Image (cartoon, rainbow, N blue to C red):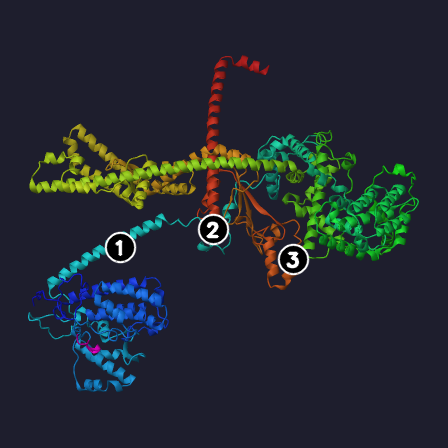
Amino acid sequence: DQPQERVKQPLPFGVLSPLAGHRQSTVRLPFNEMDDQEKENRRKRQVKKMTKIITKAWNLPHAEHFQQSSGGTDEVGTANGSSPLDLTGIGQSLDAGGYPLGRHGWEKFAGDLGGVYNRFLSQGRHKKSARRNLDEVKTFLAKVDVHLADVAEKSVPGGGVGASSPPPPSITAPKKRKASDVGSANKPKKKKGGKDDSSSRTNESLTIPEREQRALEQLGNYLEDCGGKKKQAQGFTCKVTRVSTTEKYDTVFYSQSGKRLRSMVAVAKFLNLVEDDRSLASTPNDKKGKTSSSKPVKQGVGRPKNKRELESEQRKLKKEMDKLLKAHEKATKSLDDHRNDHKNDRYPVEDEVLMEEEGHAEAEVDLRHLCSPDMDGFPGIPVECTPDLLTVWDFLCTFSRPLSLEPVSLDDFAAALIDRPIDSASSPPLYLAEAHLALLRLLLGDASSDEWWWSTLETEQTETEESRGKGAVEYSKKRREEQLVPVIKCDLGALLAVEEESSLTTSWLQALEDVRTKKPNSVGPIKSALRNAISITTNSLVKSYLRKAIKQMKPNSAGITKRAAVWLVDRVKEARPDLWGRHVSKEEVAEQSKKVADEAASYMDQVDENASAAMNDAAFDDEDVDQDSDSDEDEVVSDEEDDEEDQDAITLDSNANEKKAPAKSDHDIPVTSVVPPKPAPSIVDLLLPPGKPQPSSDIVSPFTWPCLAGAASCRILHRYKRKRNEVDDSLRELRELPPLSVAERRRREAEATKRVMSECFLTERFGEVPVEAAVQHLCSGNNYADLSPVQKLCILRVLVEAAYDSQRVFSCVEDNIKSRITASKALDNEERRAKKEEKEEKAEVEARARERLAEEAKEALIQKKRREIARTNKKTHEFTAEFIEGLTDEDIAEFDEESKAEFEALPGPSSFSRSNVNAMVAKIHEEDAFDTDTLVVLTLEEIEAREDDLLSGMNEELAAYGDINAIYQRADRETTAKIDKLRREISDFKESMLTLPQIRASAMDGLRDAIEDGTIKALKTAIKAAEAAWLTGHDEETDGVWALDLLRDGALELKSAEKRKRVTQAQRDLIAKRNKCFVRTEPTGRDKHRNSFWNLDNDETGRVWVEADYAIKDIVAPDDDNDENLVESAACVKIGADDEEKDMLSDDLYFVDGAREKFVRFSRQEYHPSGSVSSLAKRHWGCEATDSSLRSLMKNLDGRGLREASLKSSLKEIVEAIAVVSADVGTESSVDTKETKGKDTKIKDQVSGDEEQFSNAVAL
């Protein structure tokens, strides 16, 4: 059939133009003359316009009230024929195809849209918003057709268009089609029969099961009409539900797999009986406008009808498949490149996270790479004393200027400690003598030494005096209570209530204030002061009190009188703050007076005037009293001494009673003082002067420093014992525990050196602690040279510990902090300058990359246009070949208008994307690393393929000569020479190919290790080996360089290392200046197991000390080689005395399950990460002193972790510094060797022939 001609006819009845009123000239075909494609296009345009209107309505102000109805989705009747109640329901109805094509669909859409807002208007909810939004929606609909705005305005909520407004008078409404007839033109006709007629007649009286059975029968008939079989309907089940809001029923079919199908058409699609809705549409078959009856579309419609169509379809499919494969390959490559380029973007991360990702968090700690250091200590000194040796040496070198001491190397210091003199008369090494003298001068000249020099003279009585002098809190409270106790009974409240002029009160208080400075036996002056006050005051109660105090006087004692006068003065001053210039109200004065009077009244019951008089007589019976009052006025004594004398008299009886009490055991007596027992005086103590030795005195001399060092160490240790006792008491007081017993205190004091010092104090030899034995040895006046290396180190460690607490070192550190801040600012400025230069360099390279991209794009276009001109000229022969070849780039750019437009449209340098620029920047960096203009990066397989091609080419060149023997007979000498050279090249090439794979494998391994190492020396060595293995060479095609991809990475890493070195060298002086400002020695870094790595600034050799924790196992077999992985038992790791953990545990921890164990384990982690050791823990110390050992150490570090990445970077800098120092030393040694060789030659020349005379001269 020929396609029907389109006839221009007026707009058909019942069809609204989407742009009615705007484009009246648009001509549409009637429905019955439209083909399926035209209907589908119009339907899509209608849905698109409706969607835009819905979107605009959705985005209007306050549209949230109309987007979703309060009743939920059950109220939205998009599937059962009722009108939607909100915008969401209209959208769902639009997606489900609920608005048919044409005028009826637009009216239904406008009615539903207006009904949403009219529903709110009728209910009185959100009326203003509904009215504004309805007006806006009417504007949107009027752009399609003015009539639609009227439909929306007159629509009834929930009633749709049919209930809202009749059709306009200008347009006659078509007859409404039944729901069963919708889409009848697109579906096959159903068979008519009596059964169906009877079912339709009794439709309203059918039950739900009968309706389901009827629907399955209709489905079978429909499937048979579509080309299937009626029994196919038996594989489906049907469910009919009644819609609550209407009298209609909803029918749904389910397949055996549970798939839900909404109609019989969907079932036919599911069985592949029809392809889509368009395949079911009727097509015109005549020119008279008649439509053919709807015939079912059989299965297989749309397939190729003949072989030609089949082959064409196969070619199309193959072409599409090739296109998809290429796109997939390109996408895969892009994804791989992205993963490779960004695989380390998330790093570095926390080391614990990295260990969990790799599954090593719960595994046994592997520390085998730390078990074999270059050295684990120094001969003659135990390994556990290594940290103390480093501490003492680092202190002496760091504070060499305050000590006025010349630094020495670590090896020389260790050698001085282990030096053994030949006899006892030999003097110790000079550096040790200077170090002890410097420390003693620093300590004795510092005010902090007063705290420990007199520590051995402390007793419980001196502690009370010390508390008094320092104003301790307990002593102050006791003194306060003593001062509040009155001597004579009186009514202080009534006394203060008597009104008196302030000036008179101040006058008699000043008269009594003179009593405070008189001695208790100064009877005359005290009596005169009290009578003077009586004559001044007008307060009768004050006069009565003072007369009563005068009666307490004795001929040789006025202590009670003095105390009574002082008590009255203190109480009145405290009660009357207004007398001394303070601005207080009368209410505040009255309140304060009442407070003081109440406090005094609480102590009146303790007053016994007869006991006070007796105390006064007993205190002064044995004193010689001078009756001359005039001479006594010049004697002054503090009130504290008076109070002490009075208090001693009061406590006479109580002391006597205590002496009569039975003796108690030390385990029952609580301690009352933190002062340790006084050590027995030694010979050195007896010879020392009463005062503290001064640094400039003769006592501090090269001959007496051993004895003085022993005495100072004894006092320092005694002071530390007291500090430990104070800590114990404060912890027990905080936990509200009872005080320690005397026996427990003495036990703890005996273990004090094991609790407060470090490992070198804990290396017991022959049943004694080294530090105590060394102190006793020196205090006895013995020779210093008889001490062991550990004992010498102990004495130095004690002096250094005290020096850390000195004010001189503190001020030095404080000054260093200020200087370090200044130096750090200068270093920051240098780092900012380096970053700025790096940024400028990066911008310059990026500009080069953009210019190069622009040039390459221009060159590619020129070559393309040149080829096009050449091809066009071959056809037209318009130009000669010489003219085409002589065209320049400018000529091609101006060749024609099309070329001009293309050249003008070329992208500029700023038009390229960031990815293209980054790729070009990477290419430029690679070329700069090889110092070439063009670099070709190859894989190992590509290099081997090139070599095979080269060998094949040489063989072909040799074969081109033909028979070699025949050529030798008739060829000339030049040809035979070429053949011989070619044969030798082939032979040499084949021989080299035999050993080349092993050489290349070794070179590639070296490159990988060097890239991991990252140092300049290793990278240069590896690159040189790679060049020898033919992994790079000249590229003849590009006249550049070709290189292996791994070699390219090594060259880039070398360039980065050299750049880092330049920056480091530029900052070296500033870093050295900053490091001189010592504040605290910090570790170089820590690995993922938190083992510390130390590189001491004063160690010029650049050695790295490793401090590692042992891995603790519950049971270690005797045959286990524990050194292989640093494994020890808890008993072997523990050093010294255990912590007194019971002082830190409160009672609350015993009532929570697991709380006590958790707290104990947490507190023990200070000593060991496992939390299983309650004392100092032994650590494994080792030293990596060579370049190879440091590089091996770096290989075991994972740069993806935060701690190990920082440590690895620091170790690289150390290795680079060692390499620089080694190069400088090598240069100097070579120069010295040449000079020495020259001198030897000169001497040899001078004595040549005169050996005998020269020997005689040397002998003389």
Comparing labels 3 and 1, the label whose residue is closer to the camera: 3
* Region in magenta: 174-181
For the point 48% across and 33% down, the residue is 1068
Per the image, label 3 sits on a secondary structure element best described as loop
Q: Is residue 631 left or right of residue 203?
A: right
Q: In the rendered picture of this protein, how many numbered marks are placed on residues?
A: 3
* Image location (x, y in percent) of residue 231: 22, 80
Q: Which amino acid does label 1 sit on?
A: His
Q: Name the residue under label 2.
A: 350
Residue 844 in which image quadrant: top left
From mark 3 to mark 1, how far is it between C-alphas?
Answer: 67 Å
Mark 2: which amino acid?
Glu
Q: Which amino acid does label 3 sit on?
A: Leu
The residue that disc 3 covers is: 1145
Front residue (pair 825, 598) = 598
Residue at which label 1 appears? 328
Task: Provide the secondary structure element on which disc 1 rests.
Answer: helix
- Nearest the viewer among 419 and 877 is 877
Decide which of tag 3 and tag 1 comes sooner along the chain: 1
Q: What element carries label 2?
A: loop
Judge whether 203 appears above or below 76 on screen. Answer: below
Residue 888: x %, y % from top left? 16, 34
As measured in the structure, the alpha-carbon distance from the residue carrying label 1 to the one carrying label 2 is: 37 Å
In this image, 232 relative to 732: left or right?
A: left
